Amino acid sequence: MRARRMALIMAAAAGAVLGGVAVWRKTRASRPEVRTGTFSNGIEYDAVGSGPRTMLFLPGGPGIIRMVWARVSTRLLRPLAAAGFTVWRLKRRRDMPPGHTINDMADDVAHVIEEDFGGRVDLVVGASYGGLIALYLAARHPASVGHVVLDASAATATDEGLEADRKYGEALGHGRFAEAGEALLEEMAPGDRLRPMRRLLGPLLGRMLASSGNNLPDVLVETQAEMGVDARPVLPQITAPVLLIAGDQDMFLTREIVEETARLIPDCTLVWYEGLDHGKTALNKRVPGDVLAFVNRDR
């Protein structure tokens, strides 16, 4: 029975990796309407849609993963563009100096909003790591944001989650791609019994990470910035309405962390996705509908 369960988990993990590759290739082959470029402070972007409302999407991290990038486009960004948003997905600023903090990353986004969007955008959606940046952006630059969505994110993370990101980010940032692939799979399928599966699939995922276009020194800066970060002291300064979407099986967020985050933000709506982990929450097909219900509630 145990061997059968392990085989099923290995098959599911392999399917997730290979399915991600297929989605990435399909999305890459059919995206003529996507505009790409770089803002004046070195933040690269892609944009989709031409609606009257403006949304910035701040992705997770450290670094980017092309198969996740493609799934985000399919499941979140394109539906919101179809609903009337011009959606801009921002990477982190390129060539960040050592010691660049999440505060600094929030200031980088505020600079873009000031210089390129007239000082204000309608909506900022931050997924995972990007949610931390969105929190500091809303607290430090309240006039720049109309609404904020935290997708599988909160004011801080569990020690287990931070250690997982440290192992992954340091391996990726030093170009140890197979090791980074294994570390990423460990978040999806933890435990010593699954180590053989992670070693088998790690190099495959590592090749995808190697081709994802990350500036590796920036990955190390991102990883260091995340360690020990705690946005709880700034949450009462946030004046924008906030939607917090959390899965109750997320290794990065305990129920206590999520509920405290929601309680400290003056205007926060908390939505639980029952039975879902970190990745399945962030990429859930329910997210666009919940985001639209949130931003349209006062219109």
Image (cartoon, grey):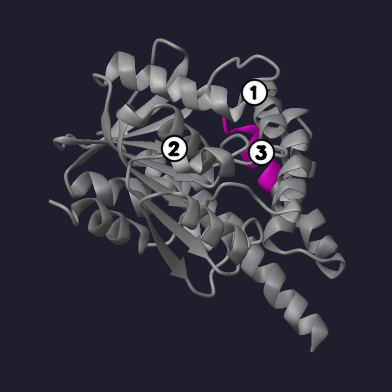
Marks 2 and 1: which is nearer the front? 2
Q: Residue at x 78, y 36 (%)?
A: 171
In whole angstroms, how far apart are the C-alphas of marks 2 and 1? 29 Å
Res 77 seen here: yes
Kindly identify which residue carries mark 2: 237
Kindly identify which residue carries mark 1: 218
Q: Residue at x 60, y 57 (%)?
A: 257
Q: Are marks 2 and 1 in contact (CB under 8 Å)?
A: no
Kindly identify which residue carries mark 3: 229
Q: Say which of 123 and 195 sits in front.
A: 123
Q: Say which of 272 and 10 sits in front.
A: 272
Q: Earlier in the sequence, mark 2 or mark 3?
A: 3
Q: Position of residue 228 (x, y in %)?
A: 72, 39
Occupied quadrant, residue 253? bottom right
| Position of the N terminus by quadrant | bottom right
What count of labels does the image hold?
3
Tag 1: amino acid: Asp
Within 10 angstroms of label 3, few (less than 14), some, or many (20 or more) residues? some
Q: Residue at x 60, y 69 (%)?
A: 249
